[in-house]
């Protein structure tokens, strides 16, 4: 069937489901007060495991395909001076455009139409000093249609944390978490302090998987610096991650540097002096 499953299934040892319509959790051990057999529970669990395996296989296939083709390199190399100026005006100079292989394409397919888009490859953390390809590609659409967000990701790939320094060992430094890759890049460029790491979450709604990755990886100070409309979410995530602080910038972090021309050291000070939750 093409209809999406209205239930989200969990198979972490205790099978259960979350109904998107009812907004309620339920367990397959009982159905309207009637005991369900152990065999039925076993069959449900096995079916869910098969679904999860198929999902993982599909993701790995898409990941292999995009890395084998590495189109982000061509999009970077074919940028015109006008397109490179866009990145520079956004606060990212040429040498950092090269480092992150930022680019531009004129043929992003959306609902049967092609749109121009700036491209941001999301590099996987390096291993043993070597690059490990990309986890995803973010597309920043140019003049998207009404009611269409300006950000898109590579179809079939999961959303991930964005690492501004994938060549660094993760977790060795205090980390500042921004909302969106461009903000993290702009702060990385303008704040040369190598005792601070800058990463980004895709949006203010952080998936459980990404939150778990942050908790596991970053055991030093964690600074949540989400956009001004996400302070409540930042407080919530900070409470779930030990050693967290919430940085409440009065404006979007990259705009403070590129439009308001705030001294980067003032931003560093606000980060450093944020109180622990």
Image (tube, rainbow, N blue to C red):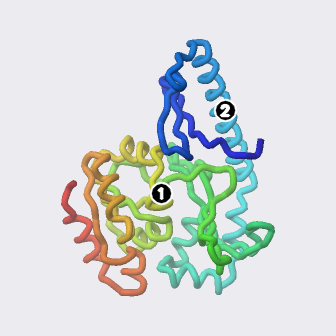
With respect to residue 239, does 164 lie above or below?
below
Which residue is the extreme one toward the right? 112
Looking at the rendered structure, the number of numbered marks drawn on it comes to: 2
Name the spot of residue 157 as percent of width and height, x first. 64, 50
Q: Is residue 261 above or below residue 131?
A: below
* Residue 174 in the figure: left or right of residue 53: left
Report the side of 232 relative to 95 (left or right). Answer: left
Q: Is residue 126 left or right of residue 194?
A: right
Tag 2, which secondary structure? helix
Q: Which mark is residue 51?
A: 2
Could you tell me which residue is drawn at 64 percent across and 19 percent down? 43
Could you say which is closer to the camera, residue 38 or residue 137?
Answer: 38
Residue 168: horizontal and vertical position, in percent?
43, 53
Residue at image mark 1:
163
Circles 1 and 2, Cβ within 8 Å, touching? The answer is no
Q: Residue at x 59, y 17 (%)?
A: 42
Question: Residue at horizontal 25%, vertical 49%?
Answer: 243
**Front-most of residues 202 and 88:** 202
Q: CA distance from mark 1 to mark 2?
A: 30 Å
In this view, the residue in front, 161 or 88, is 161
| Label 2 Cα neighbours within 10 Å, binned few <14 / some 14-19 / many ≥20 | few
- Residue 270: which quarter of the image? bottom left
Pointer 1 or 2: first along the chain: 2
Quadrant containing the N terminus is top right
Q: Quadrant of residue 47?
A: top right
The answer to whether residue 97 is left or right of residue 251 is right
Q: Residues within 10 Å of mark 1 (few under 14, many from 20)?
A: many
Vertical arrangement, residue 117 with respect to residue 261, above or below: above
Res 20 label: none
From the top left corner, tell me how far across and down residue 216 is, in percent. Answer: 38, 41
Q: Residue at x 38, y 74 (%)?
A: 253
User: Regarding mark 1 in the picture, which secondary structure is present there?
Assistant: strand
């Amino acid at each position: 069937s093409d209809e999406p499953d209205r239930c989200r299934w969990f198979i972490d040892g205790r099978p259960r489901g979350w109904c998107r319509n009812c907004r309620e959790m339920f367990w397959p051990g009982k159905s309207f007060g009637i005991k369900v057999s152990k065999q039925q529970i076993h069959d449900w669990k096995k079916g869910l495991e098969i679904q999860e395996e198929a999902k993982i296989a599909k993701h790995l296939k898409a990941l292999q395909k995009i890395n084998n083709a590495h189109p982000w390199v061509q999009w970077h190399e074919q940028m015109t001076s006008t397109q490179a100026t866009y990145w520079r005006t956004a606060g990212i100079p040429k040498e950092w455009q090269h480092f992150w292989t930022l680019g531009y394409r004129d043929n992003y397919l959306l609902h049967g139409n092609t749109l121009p888009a700036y491209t941001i490859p999301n590099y996987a953390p390096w291993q043993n000093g070597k690059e490990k390809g990309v986890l995803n590609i973010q597309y920043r659409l140019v003049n998207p249609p009404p009611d269409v967000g300006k950000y898109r990701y590579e179809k079939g790939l999961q959303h991930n944390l964005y690492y501004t320094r994938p060549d660094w060992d993760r977790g060795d430094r205090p980390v500042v978490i921004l909302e969106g890759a461009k903000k993290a890049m702009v702060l990385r460029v303008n704040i040369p302090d190598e005792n601070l790491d800058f990463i980004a979450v895709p949006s203010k709604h952080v998936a459980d998987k990404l939150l778990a990755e942050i908790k596991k990886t970053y055991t030093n100070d964690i600074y949540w610096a989400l956009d001004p409309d996400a302070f409540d979410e930042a407080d919530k995530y900070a409470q779930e991650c030990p050693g967290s602080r919430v940085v409440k910038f009065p404006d979007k972090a990259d705009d403070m540097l590129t439009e308001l021309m705030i001294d980067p050291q003032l931003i560093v000070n606000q980060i450093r002096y944020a109180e622990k939750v």
